[in-house]
Amino acid sequence: MEPQATLRQQYAMVQQSREVLLQYCDTITTADFCMENSSFGRGSMRNLLVHVGNTYELWLGKRALRREASLTAPEAIGNVEACRSFFQSVDALVAAFLDAFSQDYLSEIKLSINNTPAQASPLKLFTHVVTHEYHHKGQVLSLSRHLGYTPVDTDIMR
């Protein structure tokens, strides 16, 4: 299987797992979905999910594809359905990223991290954003449990 097909298939599994999470979030009241909790780094389930999308925008869009990136503000996402729409734009960005680097996922590209020159392969950047998403997905589920909900299994293997 071609590397591009493998990464597209892997991302399709990420999308399926994300949709399970969003379907679960559909069962959470909008007030709870957006409720700030200082015990969690990003404050709310909504904020965590927007942060996940922003990470794709920053690493794949701005740093790898060198696109202008205006990160989405959490307040712009008022409910789970708006979050789904936001992730549709993230999905389009991932597709553009995979297309742009389809011939070479292993060669290092030059980028800047906090105004410091750095290098990373497209495969490393892709791996970073996906594992970052799973880290924060766990926080979303944990935060929901603190609010009295019973989380569902959102793993790829369920």
Image (cartoon, rainbow, N blue to C red):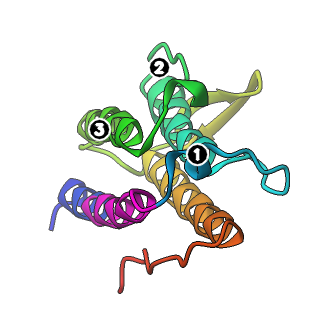
Q: Position of residue 30 (x, y in %)?
A: 51, 46
Q: Which residue is mark 1?
A: 31
SS class, disc 1:
helix
Q: Is residue 13 left or right of residue 109?
A: left
Kindly report the distance in space between the C-alpha atoms of the residues bearing marks 1 and 3.
23 Å
Q: Is residue 74 above or below residue 153?
A: above
First-in-chain label (1 vs 2): 1
Kindly report the distance in space between the C-alpha atoms of the residues bearing marks 2 and 3.
20 Å
Q: Position of residue 154 (x, y in %)?
A: 43, 74
Kindly report the distance in space between the C-alpha atoms of the residues bearing marks 1 and 2.
36 Å
First-in-chain label (1 vs 3): 1
Quarter the C terminus occupies: bottom left
Is residue 104 magenta-colored? no
First-in-chain label (2 vs 3): 2
Q: Which residue is mark 3?
A: 88
**Could you tell me what secondary structure mostly forms the magenta stretch?**
helix
Q: Which residue is mark 2?
A: 66
Q: Amino acid at mark 3?
A: Gln
Q: Residue furthest left?
A: 1
Q: Nearer the viewer, mark 1 or mark 3?
A: 1
Q: Are marks 2 and 3 in contact (CB under 8 Å)?
A: no
Question: Which residue is rendered at x = 51% and y = 24% of the image?
Answer: 76
Is residue 23 magenta-colored? yes
Question: Which residue is rendered at x = 33% and y = 36% of the image?
Answer: 97
Q: Is residue 41 left or right of residue 54?
A: right
Q: Position of residue 36 (x, y in %)?
A: 73, 45
Q: Nearer the viewer, mark 1 or mark 2?
A: 1
> What range is drawn magenta here?
12-27
Q: Is residue 72 above or below residue 149?
A: above
Q: Nearer the viewer, mark 2 or mark 3?
A: 3
Q: Is residue 155 above or below residue 74?
A: below
Q: Amino acid at mark 2?
A: Arg
